[in-house]
Image (cartoon, helix red, strand yellow):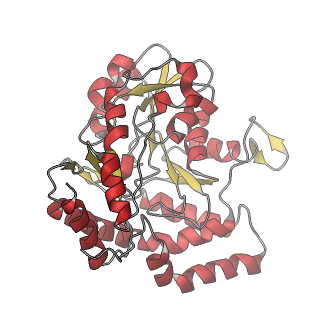
Amino acid sequence: MSTEMKIPFVSFKPLEKELDKDLRAAFERVYENSWYIEGKEDEKFEEEFAKYCDSKYCVGVGNGLDALMLALKALGVGDGDEVIVPSNTYIATALAVTYVGATPVFVEPDIKTFNINPALIEEKITDRTKAIMPVHLYGQACDMDPIMEIAKKHNLFVVEDCAQAHGATYKGKVIGSFGDAAGFSFYPGKNLGALGDAGATVTNNKELADKIRALGNYGSDYKYHHIYKGNNSRLDEMQAAFLAAKLPHLDKVNENRRAIADKYLKEITNPEVILPFVPDYAIPVWHIFGIRCKRRDELEKFLNERGIITNKHYPIPMHLQECYKDLGFKEGDFPIAEEISATELSIPMFYGMTDEQIQYVIDAINDFR
C-alpha cells in the first residue's frame, strides 16, 4: 500500500466548492442589507428547516447546547428535577440539563447501536424525573416507540437531541418530530453545518416555540418587555443565510454519506474490527462512522502513520469527567459506556470522499494485524 495519501477526518472543501457561488451570494445579501440579528434570513431558514423536520415551528438559537437547554427551560424543567440521558453521548447533552438546574440521570446504551437502551429507562425513573432526552448518536435514530410509550406512561417530556442526525429517520419518520421538542446543532462539522456556531429547536407546540424564542432573546416577548429571566442565544442572519443555502443539498449530502458507509460496511473485513450495527427501523445519516476495536489505540496509531486521520468519540465517558465528579460515580458504574469509550474509533466520513480515499481507508483497516 502506498503511504503517500493523506486522508483528513473531515473536509468541508468538496461541498463548499460546489456551493461557492450560493454561499458568497448569501454573505453579500446579508452584508448589503446591514441587518444581522432577527431578520428575514432567519425567518426563511426557520420556516424551511421546520418543514424539513416535519415540524410546525423552528426557533434559531446560538448553538446546539442552547437548543436543548432552552427547550428544557421552556418546558419548566429546573431545580430539583431529573432528566434521563444516555451514559454514552457528547457532554453537551448533560450540560443542557445542568444549566437549567436539574440533574442528569445516566442510562446505559445498547452496545450494538450506541444509543440509549429503552429497556433500562424505567428503572431510573423517580418522582423527580421530568423528562427523557434521547440522543440520535452519530446520525442513527434511537428506538423511539418504546421511549415515547414510557414517557406517556409516566407523564414525562421528551426532548430529542438531534445534534448529529439531521435527516435521519425512524420507521420512515424524520427524527426531531417525535418529542415535545428537539435540539439541533449546526456546528460546521455537522451534516448541515453553518460557517460558525449555530443551532435550532423544533417543535409542534406554538406556545412552547414562542417561549423558547423569548427565552433566547433575554426573556423578552417584545422590546424592553421581559417576561422571563432569559438568555442571549439567537441565530444570526449570516449563519441563517448560509444554512438556507445548504439545506436544499442536505439530502444529497446524506445520500453520499450512506454510500460511503455502505462501502465501509461491505468491505471492511478485519475480524478485529466491530462495525456499526444498523437496526431495521433506522436509516442513518452517518455523521460519524464509529468502529470498535479492543486494540483501538494501536489501530489509531497504525492508521495515523498511514496518513489517515481518526477521532475518538468519546474517550472519557461523562460520569468520569472531572466536571461531574459531584454526582459521585466511579469507574465500573456504567460499564457499557466505558467499553465504548475504550474501544470506539471514528474513521474518515465526509461528503465528497473519492473512491480512492475510501478504498485506501478500507485497505488500511484490513491490513491491521
Q: Residue visible at 61% across and 40% down?
A: 70
Q: In the figure, is residue 72 to the left or right of 167?
A: right
Quadrant containing the C terminus is bottom left
Residue 162 visible to an observer of this rendering: yes
Q: Is residue 31 above or below residue 254?
A: below
Picture coordinates of residue 133 (x, y %)? 44, 35
Residue 203 image offset from top left, x and y in percent = 50, 47
Q: At 35% across and 54% down in the image, what residue appears?
A: 300
Q: In the picture shown, does residue 49 fall above or below 180? A: below
The residue at the point 52 percent across, 34 percent down is: 94
Which is more toward the observer, 281 or 191? 191
- Name which quarter of the figure residue 21 lies in: bottom right
Give the residue displayed 41% in from the left and 41% down from the top: 135
**Could you tell me residue 286's position as x and y percent?**
33, 58
Q: Which of these two is toward me, 174 or 118?
A: 118
Quarter in which the N terminus is drawn: bottom left
Q: Is residue 141 visible?
A: no
Q: Is residue 205 left or right of residue 231?
A: left
Q: Nearer the viewer, residue 240 or 208?
A: 240
